[in-house]
Image: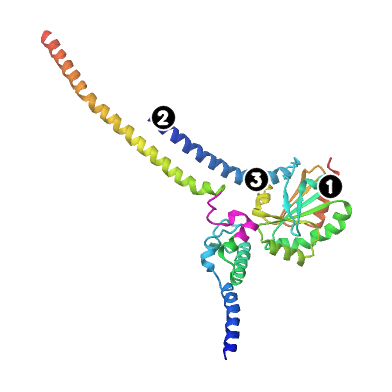
Amino acid sequence: MKRVVALVVAVVLLGLGVVLARAVMHTSGARAFPSEVASGTKPAAPDFTLPLLTGGELALASLRGKVVVVNFWASWCNPCKDEAPILQDLWVTDGESQGVAFVGVDTQDLSDDARAFAKTYGLTYPLVHDDGGDVARTWGVSAFPETFVLDAQGRAVAWFPGEVTAAGLREAIAKAQAST
Amino acid sequence: MIRRLLILLAVLLVLVPIASAAQPQFSMSEIESELMCPTCQSRLDLSHSPAADRIRAFVEKKRMEGWTKQQVEDALVADFGPSVLAAPPASGIGLVAWVAPIALVAGGLVVAVALVFVWRRRRSTRRTQTPADTALEARVDTALREFDDGS
């Protein structure tokens, strides 16, 4: 009988332990990525494949070999509205023509709202929709907007919590281009 | 006259389904209590974040278009994932949320019953030992008395 009790107690404790570990990993583990980027260790950016707002899919891995600007946004986010024209201008002047890829990751948003936002601000760079927000969580995004700049090897060299400035993003792109 | 009535009937047959389809199938308060705000992790009816306001506007629009609650929830799950639902689906990983509390309570009951059983068993064992202990006590008393008398 004692063995049965011990077994039941062990199973219950194990279950609670798993739930607790998952909760801890969920809340603290994900934030590790931006912290690593900020500390300059150039961590490999987590890969993703997400549906494009215009149809089809985009895999981050398919952009390997290029510097990539990954911007997390949502249509309801006010700073994202201020940032959108900056990103679009940089995409035209420093992105497409210079071999730098831009990806906008729309998160925690209605896809219809996101399409309307893209139309309003005339965004022409690829925009993907993060269903369920899993990619934003994996990347440790806690508020919008947040932007990461990846070098040609897919390592994150810069992180912008909040709205980017044109000068700041240009500097980060140059840093990523110089990264070996 | 009959022709006019037939035309009226035909018009009604066309209009009634359209009108009933556009009728709201559920109330806002009903669905708001079943949805979560994705940015603030609280129920939609308790949240006033910009994301919650957008979801509310979307739900209201679709409600007025005659969508069912299930259709609205499906559309929201497609955009926000299953975490937008206050109650997780009773399938896949969501099933854990339903089963885990029941399993924990059942496990707790098994432990409680087992502990009571063990406790009662120990108590009855102690009771069965009592006569033997009394006899031993008596023997010790006798031995002590004999020792006292001898000295």
Looking at the image, the residue that sits furthest to the left is: B149
Neighbor class of circle 2 (other Cα within 10 Å; few <14, some 14-19, many 20+) is: few
Q: Residue at x 60, y 85 (%)?
A: B7
Residue toward you, A81 or B128: B128
The segment highlighted magenta reads: B74-91
Q: Where residue A136 sits in the image (x, y, percent)?
A: 68, 51
Q: CA distance from mark 3 to mark 2?
A: 39 Å
Neighbor class of circle 1 (other Cα within 10 Å; few <14, some 14-19, many 20+) is: some
Q: Disc 1 marks which amino acid?
A: Lys
Q: Nearer the viewer, mark 3 or mark 1?
A: 1
Q: Regarding mark 2 in the picture, which secondary structure is present there?
A: helix
Q: Disc 3 marks which amino acid?
A: Ala
Q: Where residue B97 sits in the image (x, y, percent)?
A: 51, 48
Residue corresponding to mark 2: A3
Nearest to N terminus: mark 1 or mark 2: 2
Residue corresponding to mark 3: A30
- In magenta segment, residue A38: no
* Vertical position of residue A8 compared to residue B72: above or below: above
Q: Where residue B1 sits in the image (x, y, percent)?
A: 57, 91
Neighbor class of circle 3 (other Cα within 10 Å; few <14, some 14-19, many 20+) is: some
Q: Regarding mark 1 in the picture, which secondary structure is present there?
A: loop
Location of residue A115 by image quarter: bottom right
Residue corresponding to mark 1: A66
Residue toward you, A109 or B137: A109
Marks 3 and 2 belong to one chain = yes
Q: What chain letter is assigned to the residue under label 3?
A: A
Colour setup of the view: rainbow
